[in-house]
């Protein structure tokens, strides 16, 4: 099956479901392994250290965990991993862009406002990961690093993983400078791969396809193409529903992508 056909099929498996604050985006296949969701702007969340405290409590309730077991990061646009154990409690956020756990007592999350949020679950070990990856994270191979970390820390089989790629800026809206490709080349990405990620659209703009980059890196880590599900919702094009830094600038809120192992 071609990549575009896979993406179209994956997008059909995402649904908006009722949540205490309105709705949450949910992936039907990932839902068979882990509790999870992608929020929209109806739940007012700022950065990790901001936002409405009541909103964080409502999100914890929706995830089925105590507020101090809803664990998030101080994201740094890289590929650092943080592992959450049974005794972890939310205090001063750790720095990182990948957060993993196998603890049923915890839900882990990342936040985004155009960057790509990815949720990954292993049906065998029940370990899960939440990944935040903008262009810097993709250059640092954050999706691949997350899969490797699930295997290293929990014994997860990459070939059995399920991955859901949430709302983020799409190739329809993500115009970049041609020099950005040089950053990826310096990070060791092959020209043939970058020819697919960096494309010139019908208006002559250079755009970066973060969705395809996420898929490519997950596949490179061993996740089968037919177990990667991308919703295909662009945060910039659908700014009335999702926060977008490109559209709103520093005032933009953040969506949360959370996941919790299922017993």
Image (cartoon, rainbow, N blue to C red):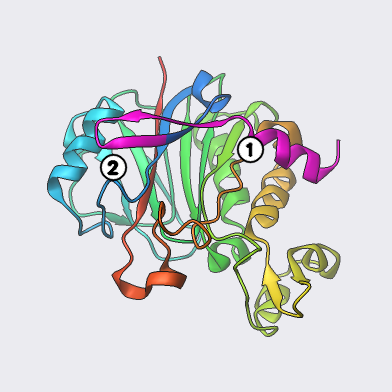
The outermost residue toward the top is 263
Task: Determine crowd level at label 1: few under 14, some 14-19, many 20+ residues with C-alpha closer than 10 A.
Answer: some
Quadrant position of the N terminus in the picture: top right
Who is closer to the viewer here, 240 or 135?
240
Q: Is residue 104 above or below residue 51?
A: above
Is residue 177 visible in the rendered structure shown here? yes
Where 193 sits versus 201, above or below? Answer: above
Q: Position of residue 85 (x, y in %)?
A: 32, 33
> For this rendering, which residue is in front, 169 or 136?
169
Residue closest to the eye, 58 or 195: 58
Q: Mark 1–mark 2 contact, CB under 8 Å?
A: no
Q: Which residues are magenta?
A: 1-24
Does the stretch in magenta take in 9?
Answer: yes
Query: Could you tell whether 38 is left or right of 41 in the image?
Result: right
Residue at image coords 19%, 44% = 55
Whether 155 is among the magenta residues is no
With respect to residue 57, does 203 lie above or below? below
Q: Which quadrant of the structure image shows residue 5?
A: top right
Q: Which mark is residue 71?
A: 2
Say if 84 sits above or below 237 in the image.
Answer: above
- Asked whether, in this view, residue 250 is left or right of residue 146, the answer is left
The residues bearing labels 1 and 2 have C-alpha atoms spaced at a distance of 28 Å
Q: Secondary structure at mark 1?
A: helix
The residue at 65%/79% (across/down) is: 180
Residue 106, image quadrant:
top left
84 or 132, which is in the foreground? 132
In the picture, the disc for residue 11 is 1
The image's mark for residue 106 is none
Q: Position of residue 111 (x, y in %)?
A: 38, 53
| Residue at the outermost front position | 240
Element carrying mark 2? strand
């Amino acid at each position: 099956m071609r990549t575009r056909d896979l993406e179209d099929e994956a997008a059909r498996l995402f649904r908006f479901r009722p949540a205490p604050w309105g709705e949450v985006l949910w992936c039907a296949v990932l839902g068979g392994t882990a509790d999870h969701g992608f929020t929209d702007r109806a739940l007012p969340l700022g950065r990790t250290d901001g936002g409405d405290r009541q909103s964080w409590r409502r999100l914890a309730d929706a995830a089925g965990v105590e507020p101090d077991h809803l664990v998030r990061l101080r994201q740094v646009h890289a590929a650092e991993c943080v592992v959450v154990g049974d005794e972890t409690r939310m205090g001063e956020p750790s720095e990182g862009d990948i957060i993993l756990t196998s603890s049923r007592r915890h839900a882990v999350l990342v936040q985004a406002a155009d960057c790509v949020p990815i949720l990954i679950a292993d049906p065998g070990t029940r370990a899960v990961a939440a990944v935040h990856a903008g262009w810097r994270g993709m250059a640092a191979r954050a999706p691949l690093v997350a899969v490797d970390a699930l295997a290293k820390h929990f014994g997860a089989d990459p070939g059995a993983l399920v991955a859901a790629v949430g709302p983020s800026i799409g190739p329809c809206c993500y115009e970049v400078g041609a020099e950005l490709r040089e950053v990826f080349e310096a990070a060791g990405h092959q020209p043939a791969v970058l020819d697919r990620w960096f494309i010139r659209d019908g208006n002559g703009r250079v755009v970066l396809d973060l969705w395809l980059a996420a898929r490519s890196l997950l596949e490179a880590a061993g996740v089968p193409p037919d177990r990667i599900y991308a919703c295909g919702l662009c945060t910039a094009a659908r700014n009335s529903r999702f926060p977008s830094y490109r559209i709103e600038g520093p005032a933009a809120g953040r969506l949360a992508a959370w996941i919790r192992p299922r017993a």
